[in-house]
Image (spheres, rainbow, N blue to C red):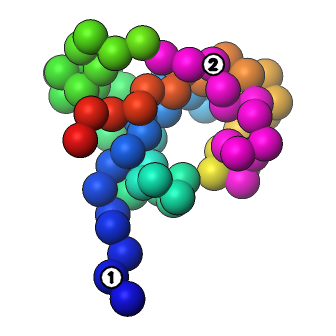
Amino acid sequence: MHRDNRATFLVLIESGGPMEALLFDAERRLVAEIDATSEEVGVMTAGLTPERAGADEAWRQALRGHSAEERAQALIYRLAL
């Protein structure tokens, strides 16, 4: 069975100081990490409104390793496909 690895979500989250930009597929599996200060992030998020849903149960496993405070402050963008 073929897994769809297209990025569906972009998560901007602090990681002990610097911001990380994490790309996840529809199943909330990590696809890639990119520099949060890169031009790519600006292009991907242009016109999108983020949610602060990192503390939700749906994101708990995907964002493990981050504190509850970092998860609560995370900006989650649903990318246009």
Residue hosting label 1: 2
Residue 22, above or below 7: above
Question: How many neighbours does mark 1 have within 10 angstroms: few (below 14), some (14-19), or many (20 or more)?
Answer: few
Q: Secondary structure at mark 2?
A: loop
Where, quadrant-wise, is the C terminus in this rendering? Answer: top left
Q: Which residues are magenta?
A: 50-61
Quarter occupied by residue 34: top left
Q: Secondary structure at mark 1?
A: loop
Residue 38 visible in the current orientation: no
The answer to whether 50 appears left or right of 1 in the picture is: right
The CA distance from mark 1 to mark 2 is 31 Å
Q: Residue at x 66, y 26 (%)?
A: 53
Q: Residue at x 29, y 56 (%)?
A: 6
Residue hosting label 2: 52
Quarter occupied by residue 78: top left
Task: Tell whether label 2 touches label 1 (CB within 8 Å).
Answer: no
Magenta region, mostly helix, strand or loop? loop
**Residue 79 percent location from the top left of the image:** 33, 33
The residue lying furthest to the bottom in this view is 1
**Residue 63 percent location from the top left of the image:** 66, 45
Q: Residue at x 67, y 31 (%)?
A: 54
Quarter occupied by residue 37: top left
Amino acid type at mark 1: His
> Is residue 33 one of those drawn in magenta?
no
Amino acid type at mark 2: Arg
